[in-house]
Each structure stands twice: as structure tokens, then as C-alpha cells.
Image (cartoon, rainbow, N blue to C red):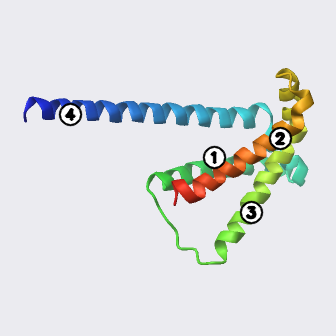
């Protein structure tokens, strides 16, 4: 190998190592934040209390950890399932129900938006803050569906 090829190989390897480090650091930060929110705010016990199934709270925790590990692994390996036409809407409905319950539990445990607006001095524009969050979520979803996965 000549000198230019070795240089390109070294730069490519360095770029891959930096990318892997950033990805791993980001994953640890997001995962740690996810766990911290659920543990510190007692979201799962509150979710169990809302649904009247407090005796199953440990199963909720197991399901969350197992689901996170399973689907992260499947995402890394680009596994795709052929589920037919009727199963994905059912899975989506169940996901939506879970997310709605978690949002309800978070809302009851912590009044996030009013506290955020007060701390940032944005109490007078709280409505605009909510609209901006909703529009940002919609734009992000549309970008993901049509551009990123397109």
C-alpha cells in the first residue's frame, strides 16, 4: 500500500471510531435519562395505580426493560416482520394506549409545562409553546416518514 492509501485508511478508521463513540455516548445519555425519568418520578408505580394493577408493577418494569433490549437489538440487525395488514394497526393502538397512560402518569406526577414556562419566563406565551411543541412533533414525524425512511 502506498502512503496515500494508508492515510485514507487511518482517517476512515478514525472517523468510524469517533462515530461509534458519539453513538455510544448518545445512547448511554438517552438510556440513562429514560431510566432516570421513570425511576425518579415513580412513573411505573403511578401507571399501575392508574390502571388498578399495582400488584403487577414489577411485571411492568420487566416488560419495559425486555422490550427496550429486544427492539434495540432487532433495530441494530434490521430485522423486519411480515405481519400482514391487520396486526400493525393493533400494535399501533396498543403503543398509543401505553404512551397515553405514561403521559397521564407523568402529567399527574409532575406539572412539566407550567413549571418550564414559569422558569423560562414564558407564562404569558404558554399556548404558543404548546403549539410549537405539537407542530415540531408533527414536522419531525413527517420528516421521518417521508424523507428519512422514504
- What's the distance in space between the residues labelled 1 and 2, CA to CA? 30 Å
Q: Where is residue 120 in the image (x, y as percent from the top left)?
A: 82, 22
- Give the left or right position of residue 68, taking residue 18 as reference: right
Residue 44 image label: none
- Which element is circle 4 on? helix
Residue at the spot 52% in from the left edge and 69% down from the top edge: 81
| Tag 3 residue | 94
Assign a secondary structure to mark 3: helix
Q: Position of residue 32 (x, y in %)?
A: 62, 32
Q: Earlier in the sequence, mark 3 or mark 2?
A: 3
112 left or right of 27 in image: right
Dot in front, 3 or 4: 4
In space, the residues marked 3 and 4 are separated at their CA atoms by 49 Å
Q: Residues within 10 Å of mark 1 (few under 14, many from 20)?
A: few
Distance of label 3 from label 2 (alpha carbons): 25 Å
Q: As drawn, is 93 to the left or to the right of 66?
A: right
Q: Nearer the viewer, residue 32 or 147?
A: 147
Q: Residue beneath label 2, please?
A: 130
Residue 110 seen in render:
no
Residue where numbered disc 1 is placed: 65
From the viewer's side, name the closer residue of 114 and 109: 114
Task: Compute the Cα span from label 2 to label 4.
Answer: 48 Å
Question: Residue shown at 65%/73% (left/top)?
Answer: 87
Q: Residue 27's spot in the image, x, y percent?
A: 54, 37
Q: In which quarter of the image is the N terminus?
A: top left
Mark in front: 3 vs 1: 3
Amino acid at each position: 500500500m502506498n502512503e496515500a492509501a494508508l492515510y485514507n485508511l487511518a482517517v476512515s478508521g478514525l472517523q468510524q471510531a469517533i462515530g461509534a463513540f458519539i453513538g455510544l455516548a448518545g445512547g448511554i445519555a438517552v438510556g440513562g435519562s429514560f431510566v432516570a425519568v421513570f425511576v425518579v418520578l415513580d412513573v411505573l408505580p403511578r401507571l399501575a395505580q392508574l390502571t388498578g394493577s399495582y400488584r403487577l408493577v414489577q411485571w411492568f418494569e420487566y416488560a419495559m426493560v425486555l422490550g427496550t433490549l429486544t427492539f434495540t437489538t432487532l433495530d441494530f440487525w434490521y430485522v423486519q416482520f411480515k405481519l400482514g395488514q391487520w396486526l400493525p394497526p393493533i400494535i399501533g393502538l396498543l403503543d398509543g394506549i401505553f404512551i397515553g397512560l405514561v403521559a397521564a402518569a407523568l402529567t399527574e406526577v409532575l406539572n412539566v409545562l407550567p413549571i418550564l414556562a414559569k422558569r423560562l419566563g414564558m407564562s404569558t406565551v404558554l399556548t404558543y409553546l404548546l403549539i410549537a411543541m405539537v407542530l415540531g412533533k408533527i414536522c419531525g414525524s413527517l420528516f421521518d416518514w417521508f424523507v428519512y425512511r422514504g
